[in-house]
Amino acid sequence: MATTQNDEEQIRLIECPICDHKAKQQVNSPPRTICPKCGNFYADSGEGPPPPRRLARERQERKNIPENEERNKQGGRLQTISNFFQNLGSNKKGKNKTEKPYNSARSQPSSSMSEDSSSELPPITNGQMINQKRSPNFQLSLTSKSRESLSPRSLRSDKATLSPQNRHIYPVRTKNIDQFLDDIKNAKEKDNWKIVQDFYSTTFDSFMEINAVFKRDPGKEYKSTEDPGLKMDFVQIVFDNLLDTPQEIQKATLKATINSLLKDKRPHTKDDLRAYLVLMQNPQFESASTYVIFAHMLRQIAALNDHDHHFLVHWIRRLKSVPVRKLIKRLHSFISIRLFPPRPQDLPPMQKCSWWVPSATKVMALINAANNLSSPPLVPFYEFYNPTLDHLDLMAEYYTWQNPSSCAGFSFCQYPFILSITAKRTILQRDSEQQMIIMARRSLVAKVQRRQLPDVGMLFLNLNIRRAYLVSDSLNEIAEKQHDLKKKLKVTFVGEPGLDMGGLTKEWFLLLLRQIFHSDYGMFTYDKKAGVHWFSSAQCETYQEFNLVGVLMGLAVYNSIILDIRFPACCYKKLLSPAVVPYNNPRAVVGVTPLTVNDLKTVQPEVASGLKDLLIYDGDVEDDFGLTFQVSQSEFGSVKTVELKPGGADISVTKANREEYVQLYVDWVLNRSIYPQFQAFYHGFHSVCASNALIMLRPQEVEMLVCGNPNLDMKELKKVTVYDGYSSNDPAIKNFWDILFSFPLDLQKKFLLFTTGSDRIPIGGMSEMQFKISRVSGSDLLPMAHTCFNQLVLPGYKSKKSLRQKLLTAIENAEGFGLE
């Protein structure tokens, strides 16, 4: 960091260690922590003590010199904040009307990055941290008459609490929820909001005041990650009532919030973290007019060190679902409006605040981490998706993430939880397409070098299958065409005319998987209670069939085909362990991940229930259960015994070692006993979907890519339906939709399974599929379906009652290959 001196001010030149961007900043201002160009953190500047000029000013403020008060009264800095709120949300320069959407990879801020008033928090106090009972700002905001009329419950007490850590004098606040609600009620009845306004303007005037009001015991430090020490119910009630107060109170609250943020200092205490946790929940930040303030608060939170972030994460997980959901929604709106502003002139120019989106995303990452630590999660993982980001140049984001040396900067791929499953599928498919194009070019060059004519077929994965030899032909074709797996799939059934427009491919998937997953085939077992398939532990001479199943799943993802495969969630955890295949290391261990008895419950519920009973049994475990560290399995009609650890046959299970026994048992069932089978399955899947983009996926998202989205909306299905022999106004069609809409969810899923071969929809919604209803004569017939073409053949029944009865009979007796 270089420092220069001019006649009036000391200026320091700071340089980002990532993108080498340089910016000028006054030495006496708070140190910048986030690069305005790329959003990365600056290294610790290591600057020495503040310059003499700043020390003199701070000493003057501590003495509370009347000259400062007089300057404020004359409209100095306090007048600045007043003008700021009068013009909040406007852009006087009007230079931002043609602003392009945000693209982090090519964001080029102007060379001069000194932020003007449109992106800086206007100062409203001369003090850096006022330790007196009253700050000068508080005295200026109230007249002497109004101070005398304040309620004793809302005024500062003469009592004070001394924190031994930072020596701050904490004023005692005794107002509780009931007293606050009484103040609100009285203010509404008497139309006199003075007490309420004084409460808000005082409470949020500093971090110390926030703690004095909302901390359960201001004299206690609350250093545990398990307890933030805040009266969260009080926080929620204060904020829930804020938006119903007059505008003057809301403006006063924002002014006080700015004042508290201007006093930001380092290092931060736990009380500062508590204040941030409170301020994050302010509903005023839902309005775009407050985004300048919100952005600066997010930057301060994002710039905290790892230790402080650790505490914030654990404190956030102690919040209830409702405030967490509101906070997530607030951050999503902030990011979306900054990227695609409906009124660009209402926000500062993008080049002046390119750090806004990175800061908000990093704060969102803290909430996501807290959500992942919670069991059950505070909110479903898909609530972190921001669909607005689907409209960005996703591949530019991906390449920025993949090439940090040449494309330094922020990328949403660094925080994949915020990208929707649709966006991740787009990245995965386009990345695979790029690999396919490279391979196609190589094939073309090879043909030209051999003086052969290129053909269109070289652009596709063409499979020629005989129906009588479905599995063997599929195995042979895929084995011979390993280098073409990333190409678009086309299937031809030998001896049958017709071109594959999608129907033959889907039929091949359905027929092949139905045969492989049949219990007589012996590759997979099926647990009726769990409703899932699992890998058979029986030893095989070859595991090519398991490799084939993995290839099929990969092809389904790449070709956007939904499969009705019923694997438990732990299967997809294993499939991402690791997410990227170890390069050129055939001996690398794959598909092995730590699993628990809860994972076993999704595969073998009864066995898992027995193990849980063992863990909580109060009696004599050794005598009553008579177990040793062995496990027995049935293999081709005979029982085989395996030791869970060396000498396990001679080690009895006792109360002292039963946890070890349960963990070894779970590991054996889900990892060790099926390792060669799953290894082949793993490599088959990754032979098609090999991409660094897999790192961004959750196990649940891999399942959605393979099996589709479980969230159904039959009204959306109606929108994509086409008719053959019917029209949308026919009575039979109107009756059909009325009946289908009236079905409960389980019957709607059975109908979808009956007509499409899967009870799920594409991850992009119904708009990605086409549904067809065809007319056939014969009112005595049951409805029929062609799953390969998503087609329902519906006779023209005369009555609605008859249609309902026939439709129920058809779907109740339909069976998918995933069901027994």
Image (tube, rainbow, N blue to C red):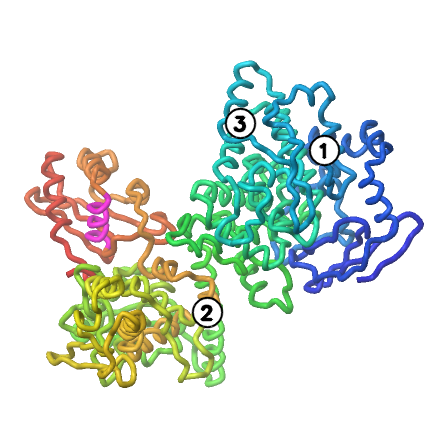
The magenta segment:
745-756
Image label count: 3
Q: Say which residue label 2 marks.
A: 691
- Residue at x 45% of width, y 78% of height: 582
Residue toward you, 269 or 709: 269
Characterize the local packing of mark 2: few (<14), some (14-19) or many (20 or more) Cα atoms within 10 angstroms: some
Q: Say which residue label 3 marks.
A: 180
Q: Which mark is residue 621?
A: none
Q: Please, what is the three-letter code of the amino acid marked with disc 1?
A: Arg
Q: Please, what is the three-letter code of the amino acid marked with disc 2?
A: Ser
Give me the C-alpha separation between circle 2 and circle 3: 56 Å
Labels 2 and 3: the sequence-earlier one: 3
The reply to whether residue 107 is in sight is yes
| In the image, residue 752 lies in the stretch drawn in magenta | yes
Rendering coords of residue 40 (x, y %): 65, 59
Above or below, comparing residue 518 to residue 326 in the picture: below
- In this rendering, the label closer to the viewer, 1 or 2: 1
- Farthest front residue in view: 159
Q: Are circles 3 and 1 on residues that touch, CB within 8 Å?
A: no
Characterize the local packing of mark 1: few (<14), some (14-19) or many (20 or more) Cα atoms within 10 angstroms: few
Task: Answer with the quarter of the image where residue 744 lies.
Answer: top left
- Quarter occupied by the N terminus: bottom right
Residue toward you, 717 or 608: 608
Q: Say which residue label 1 marks.
A: 134
Give me the C-alpha separation between circle 3 and circle 1: 21 Å
- In this rendering, the label closer to the viewer, 2 or 3: 3
